[in-house]
Image (cartoon, coloured by chain):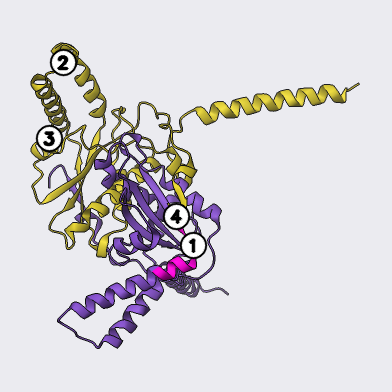
Chain colours: A yellow, B purple
Amino acid sequence: MTNPRKIFLQLAGLLAFVTFLGCLAAKAAPAGPAANIWEVFQQRRSVRKFRPDAVPEADIKKMIDAARLAPTSGNQQPWRFLVIRDRDKINRMKEACVQKALRQFDSGSDKKTSREQFESSVRNQFSGYFSAPVYIVVLTDNRSPYPDYCHWDGPMAAGYLMLAARALGYGTVFITDSIPDSVTKEVLHIPDTYTRVCITPVGIPVEWPESSPKKALDQFIALEAL
Amino acid sequence: MTNPRKIFLQLAGLLAFVTFLGCLAAKAAPAGPAANIWEVFQQRRSVRKFRPDAVPEADIKKMIDAARLAPTSGNQQPWRFLVIRDRDKINRMKEACVQKALRQFDSGSDKKTSREQFESSVRNQFSGYFSAPVYIVVLTDNRSPYPDYCHWDGPMAAGYLMLAARALGYGTVFITDSIPDSVTKEVLHIPDTYTRVCITPVGIPVEWPESSPKKALDQFIALEAL
């Protein structure tokens, strides 16, 4: 005969187990394409290590097609997206970054490691950054109608681009200092008529990182007064 | 007896009619909530005239909850979102904008209209801008860890906020000069420790405007070289 108390305990145990599984699933980083905008907001990550799998040109175009729909001052649409897939160019950017870091090391006084150790750690870091099959340099054109407004238009388009990439299942990261402006200018021959917003790798992540710890929502909101 | 040619012609006519209806539907501006990210990218508009319907606080929080997930330098999360629903404050911003425009008119030399005509047109313009039930001032905190990077972090969060608002069925517009920084600073008592990214109304549009004419996708893309 069934014992109601036993059934209750079994159900409670089952519930606890399912909840535990749910927690595990929530902890696991999401992957793959997603079309629901709330999921995409949640699932975008800054990715710094990529699989070499090629990104189809149609996907690159879809990302840029989304990026160009960002808000833009007076509809000026000042953006250019420089797409780099040439491995030789990518490797030259990487080597230029390593050499720049080594020059900084050589001119610095507070050396905590040997030059060899430093070079090894720098090469390792840039191996990740430069492991993607595609790089997109987000630029604004200084000759656009309202160049003083490009500093708003530029990052918004970059933000859209990265959401679109995530929706298609690709990782990105908004890079400024780690791949210096001077390196992209020199290796990719970017003229002074453009301002670089950022450069981002685009590719399938080796793994989707966990989210960085975030402040509580309430810390961002001020109702009626600061 | 059925005449195959007649059936073919009828089907062709039906197809033309359906295509015509499809074109009409495509021309009509989209409205209402949308969760598909590609639709949201396409359907966001700059809206400048709103219905007075209140925006539930849960929706405002959902927008800000999305905005704070934007990429941020060194995870600094430098944002504050000042939410204004107090009609008195909104009207004071509106009047400050009108008075500022009138002072500019008075100090200008090239007057193409009378002061009365100018004031009437300015009041009409600001009636639209200030018709929303909610205003969100997007700010970055100059005391954040990396203030030199806020000019990237700020617009990206604003872009996210506007996408989230559109997903929930609300219109927004990225306002800088039209509601001057000085006006929001003065009326809303924003201290100098913050930098304003923009202010945006949030509300249900009187109508969803057609998209501004956009350049062709290919004009934005540079493959391998500019």
How far is disc 2 from disc 4 in space, using C-alphas?
48 Å
Q: Which mark is residue A225?
A: 4
| Image spot of residue B196 (x, y percent) | 32, 54
How far is disc 2 from disc 3 in space, using C-alphas?
24 Å
Q: Using the image, name the chain to which the residue with label 4 belongs.
A: A
Q: Using the image, name the chain to which the residue with label 3 belongs.
A: A
Q: Nearer the viewer, mark 1 or mark 4?
A: 4
Q: Using the image, name the chain to which the residue with label 1 belongs.
A: B
Q: How many neighbours does mark 2 have within 10 angstroms: few (below 14), some (14-19), or many (20 or more)? A: few
- Please give left or right for residue A103 compared with residue A78 in the image: left
Q: Which region is colored magenta?
A: B83-92
Q: How many neighbours does mark 4 have within 10 angstroms: few (below 14), some (14-19), or many (20 or more)? A: few
How far is disc 1 from disc 3 in space, using C-alphas?
47 Å
How far is disc 2 from disc 1 in space, using C-alphas?
55 Å
- Secondary structure of residue under mark 1: loop
Q: Which residue is mark 1?
A: B85
Q: Which residue is mark 3?
A: A183
- Secondary structure of residue under mark 2: loop
From the viewer's side, name the closer residue of B220 and B109: B109
Q: Nearer the viewer, mark 2 or mark 4?
A: 4
Disc 1 + disc 3, Cβ < 8 Å: no
From the viewer's side, name the closer residue of A220 and B17: A220
Choose the circle earlier in sequence order: 3 or 4.
3
Q: Nearer the viewer, mark 1 or mark 3?
A: 1
Q: How many neighbours does mark 3 have within 10 angstroms: few (below 14), some (14-19), or many (20 or more)? A: some
Amino acid at the residue labelled 1:
Arg
- Secondary structure of residue under mark 3: helix
Whether the magenta-drawn stretch holds residue B162 is answered as no
* A189 versus B57 height, above or below: above
| Residue at screen point 40% across, 31% down | A212
From the viewer's side, name the closer residue of B200 and B11: B200
Q: Which residue is mark 2?
A: A111
